[in-house]
């Protein structure tokens, strides 16, 4: 198990947002976290990482901070870059938890590999703040890759990206899962989630409504209960397309 | 209109001057003094009951050589209201009295004199005579002047006793054109302030003072409480004048006959 | 970028020497340095060792401390407007120092002066971090700073006005504007040890400040930005700004100008900006202190006047950029 969450509950401002959520992630899985706004997707990720107070058990939050940092990388929803650092320096921040702190030979190799994988070589010396939104997103993902962790947790990683960038991002996550890593990402686009994720977790009102392979989770009755919508499925050669109607 | 006002001011000033020159018969009956230096001269020269009030500073033993005598008078804190209520016919303020206070008292029809501080012995002599005239006590003034002249002549020392420096809070020094400078000169010392082109009271950087290497260092007295301005007097660089340092006292403050005591303190 | 640190070191060394050789007495340079190194009789060694040397050392220490804390606060709050002077930390330190002096505590034990200033500075940083922590925006930060500065300034004025000493009230200017004039080696020994301790504490936060570039949550998942970071930063800032203000008054804008100027030279990395800003701060304060002695040699022009003339326009420029939504 890469991450086990047991009976996790979170209360924010006296309002319960998660009730007894249990979840276990295995190596090689790309898990899509779906659910309506306010279902508790972000809270689940933040609590699992130990960023917010919760009751229950999270194996990740139980780790000491330095070990946790070498076990899970986190891409928050707000893609924040506070200072005009270069792309190379930004990516190297992912090496902070490792012994070299970003400056050793191994750190440089890991940083270069992450930059290469995200196709950022032409931007290496560019100031990260001057890049376009999509390029910044790639640089931040490269930072998470440089952290070289078995688990990557990403909060709405494709929000605000153009279709090409969305596809590239999800393909990368699927590749990472293929390499034996685990990815947990919250996604709003049900069609893309169905196509790329190996497993979906549907959250509604702080409960896990369904957990399993995409076709088992994206059932009409479950979607109606969670989102209050009906969907139309169109099978295409590239996979199923799901249209909310 | 403006011209008229000016002229009426001039007439008023002339009237005041004439009044000042009137014989003793027209002497003011209720005099209030509101600055430390005129307090002392007034107490020395006024007839009994003539002086109504002195400034509260005059009763402060840290500031006033006549604190004991001053205790017999009503103290004022220099506010127009309290002074007006004393119904004075002459108020002796000073050039440093807030102009608003002086203007207010004058508007209320009270005669206000503002003598400047005396910076040398001739000015002290003139002050004594003038105070005697204001109070209508010219004979007392003549007697005081004679005693002062005799005291001064006895206290004076010829020059050539060495070089001395005056140093006060915030790094101020006093040159030859000041009362403290005059005291230093009368005691026979050369004032190092003159070496730096200082004639009045102004700041002298600490390192210039140290480089001047004076034979005697006379520093200002410390006040209760603490201040950064006085901290300079404790600077380790001044500790290099052991046995040469001395502190000024209340006799240095005002241009009154007490300056002869200050001169003697430098013996 | 590689040559930045040697260049800054050289600049600080040159300005330190210039500071030693600047003064109203116009001493011959070689004689002055000989007297400084070898001592001897007469007033020259006293001037060099007791007056000019402590002034130059404090110029380096106070400037470096203000530059370092400015860079650290900016990194922590992720806001280029954070600066110990502007946001009231120096003001609170001055209040602490004034209370120690006027209650006579500093007479009982000399260490009470830097300690009280330290407590004041710590209260200032703690208030600021509580009001405008890492999630507060620029507006919150500046408003919190205005409130803390006003409170500290009023407190300082009140304490000085209540003093029985006639000189105390006029010293508000010193506490608001700062000066290195006529400081002695005693001030150096009082201020330097806590400042060095604070600098060591702040340097331990450098990786965490780097990680905070990605935001608080990401920094936390990098194993940084735990609660200990906040305490190290508050304590480090207080240990530096407190004693520095106790001996030199509140000198503003150094911690604003220096990190801003040097940020492009270190690739904007907060960890590299810390030592660079320390050196830059030392250079700026030494240069300002030389300038105040050259501009009006016979008067104690306050240091803060000069740093404000340089810093205030930059501050306005930064606010303008923040207002129009641009990043700095």
Image (cartoon, coloured by chain):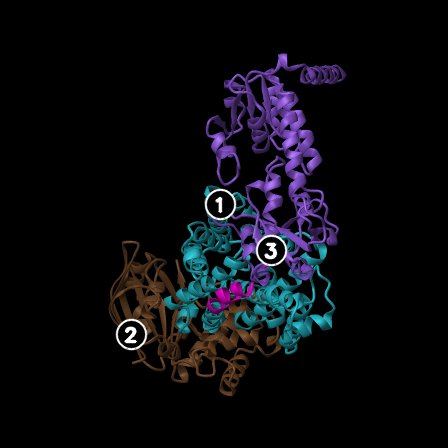
Chain colours: A brown, B purple, C cyan
Which image quadrant: the N terminus of chain A? bottom left
| Location of mark 3 (residue) | C318
Q: Position of residue A208 (x, y in %)?
A: 27, 66
In the image, what residue occupies the spot 65% across and 55% down? C306
Q: Chain of mark 1?
A: C
* Rendered view: C236 above or below A16: below
Q: Are marks 1 and 3 on the same chain?
A: yes
Q: Disc 1 and disc 2: Cα gap in Å?
A: 53 Å
Q: Which residue is outermost to the right? A: B3
Q: Which residue is mark 2?
A: A62
Tell which tag, 1 or 3, sits nearer the viewer: 1
Main secondary structure found in the magenta portion: helix
* Chain of the residue that carries numbered disc 2 in the rendered image: A
- Residue stretch rendered in magenta on the structure: C182-195
Q: Quadrant of residue C53?
A: bottom right
Label whose residue precedes the other's in the sequence (1 or 3): 1
In the rendered image, which residue does mark 1 sit on? C160
Whole-angstrom CA distance, mark 1 to mark 3, is 34 Å
Of residues A135 and C104, the one nearer the viewer is: C104
* Closer to the camera in the image, B241 or A140: B241
Q: Is residue B146 above or below residue C222?
A: above
């Amino acid at each position: 198990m890469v991450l086990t969450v047991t009976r996790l509950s979170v209360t924010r401002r006296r309002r319960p947002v998660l009730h007894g959520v249990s979840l276990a992630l295995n190596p090689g899985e790309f898990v899509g976290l779906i659910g309506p706004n306010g279902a508790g997707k972000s809270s689940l990720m933040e609590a699992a990482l130990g960023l917010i107070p919760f009751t229950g058990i999270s194996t990740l939050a139980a780790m000491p901070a330095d070990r946790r940092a070498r076990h899970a990388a986190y891409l928050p929803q707000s893609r924040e870059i506070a200072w005009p650092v270069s792309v190379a320096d930004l990516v190297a921040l992912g090496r902070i938890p490792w012994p070299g702190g970003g400056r050793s030979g191994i750190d440089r190799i890991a940083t270069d590999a992450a930059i290469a994988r995200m196709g950022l070589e032409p931007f290496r010396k560019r100031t990260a703040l001057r890049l376009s939104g999509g390029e910044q997103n790639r640089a931040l993902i490269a930072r998470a890759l440089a952290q070289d962790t078995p688990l990557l947790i990403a909060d709405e990683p494709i929000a605000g990206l153009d279709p090409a960038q969305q596809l590239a991002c999800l393909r990368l996550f699927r590749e990472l899962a293929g390499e034996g890593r685990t990815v947990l990402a919250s996604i709003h686009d049900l069609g893309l989630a169905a196509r790329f994720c190996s497993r979906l977790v549907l959250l509604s009102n702080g409960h896990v409504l369904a957990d399993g392979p995409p076709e088992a989770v994206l059932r009409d009755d479950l979607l109606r209960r969670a989102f209050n919508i009906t969907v139309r499925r169109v099978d295409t050669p590239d996979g199923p397309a799901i249209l909310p109607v | 209109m403006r011209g008229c006002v000016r002229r009426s001011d001039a007439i008023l000033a002339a009237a005041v001057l004439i009044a000042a020159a009137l014989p003793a018969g027209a002497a003011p009956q209720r005099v209030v003094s509101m600055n430390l230096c005129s307090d002392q001269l007034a107490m020395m020269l006024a007839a009994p009951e003539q002086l109504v009030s002195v400034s509260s500073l005059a009763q402060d033993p840290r500031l006033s050589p006549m604190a004991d005598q001053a205790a017999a008078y009503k103290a004022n804190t220099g506010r127009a209201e309290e002074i007006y209520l004393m119904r004075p016919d002459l108020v002796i303020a000073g050039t440093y009295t807030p102009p608003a206070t002086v203007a207010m008292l004058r508007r209320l029809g009270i005669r206000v004199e503002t003598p400047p501080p005396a910076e040398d012995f001739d000015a002290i002599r003139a002050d004594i005579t003038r105070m005697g005239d204001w109070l209508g006590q010219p004979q007392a003034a003549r007697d005081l002047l004679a005693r002062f002249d005799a005291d001064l002549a006895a206290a004076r020392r010829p020059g050539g006793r060495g070089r001395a420096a005056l140093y006060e809070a915030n790094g101020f020094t006093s040159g030859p054109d000041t009362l403290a400078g005059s005291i230093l000169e009368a005691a026979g010392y050369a004032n190092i302030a003159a070496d730096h082109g200082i004639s009045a009271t102004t700041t002298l950087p600490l390192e210039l003072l140290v480089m001047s290497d004076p034979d005697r260092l006379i520093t200002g007295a410390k006040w209760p409480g603490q201040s950064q301005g006085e901290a300079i007097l404790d600077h380790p660089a001044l500790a290099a004048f052991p046995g040469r340092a001395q502190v000024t006292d209340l006799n240095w403050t005002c241009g009154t006959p007490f300056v002869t005591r200050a001169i003697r303190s430098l013996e | 970028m590689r040559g930045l640190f040697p260049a800054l070191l050289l600049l600080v060394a040159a300005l330190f020497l210039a500071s030693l050789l600047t003064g109203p007495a116009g001493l011959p340079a070689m004689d002055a340095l000989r007297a400084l190194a070898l001592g001897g009789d007469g007033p020259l060694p006293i001037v060099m060792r007791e007056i000019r040397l402590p002034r130059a050392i404090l110029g380096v220490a106070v400037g470096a401390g203000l530059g370092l804390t400015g860079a650290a606060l900016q990194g922590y709050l992720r806001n280029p407007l954070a600066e110990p002077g502007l946001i009231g930390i120096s003001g609170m330190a001055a209040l602490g120092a004034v209370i120690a002096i006027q209650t006579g505590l500093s007479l009982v034990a000399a260490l009470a002066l830097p300690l009280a200033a330290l407590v004041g500075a710590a209260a200032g940083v703690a208030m600021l971090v509580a009001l405008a922590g890492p999630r507060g925006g620029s507006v919150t930060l500046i408003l919190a700073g205005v409130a803390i500065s006003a409170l500290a300034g009023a407190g300082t004025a009140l304490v000085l006005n209540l003093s029985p000493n006639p000189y105390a009230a006029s010293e508000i200017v010193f506490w608001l504007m700062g000066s290195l004039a006529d400081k002695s080696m005693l001030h150096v020994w009082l201020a330097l040890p806590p400042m060095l301790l604070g600098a060591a504490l702040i340097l331990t936060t450098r990786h965490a400040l780097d990680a905070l570039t990605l935001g608080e949550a990401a920094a936390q998942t990098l194993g940084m930005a735990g609660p200990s970071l906040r305490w190290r930063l508050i304590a480090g800032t207080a240990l530096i700004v407190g004693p520095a203000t106790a001996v030199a008054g509140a000198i503003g804008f150094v911690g604003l100008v220096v990190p801003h100027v040097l940020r492009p030279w270190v690739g904007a990395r907060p960890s590299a900006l810390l030592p660079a800003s320390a050196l830059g701060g030392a250079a700026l304060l030494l240069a300002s202190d030389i300038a105040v002695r050259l501009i009006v040699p016979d008067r104690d022009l306050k240091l803060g006047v000069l740093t404000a003339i340089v810093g205030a326009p930059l501050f306005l420029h930064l606010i303008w950029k923040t207002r129009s939504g641009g990043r700095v």
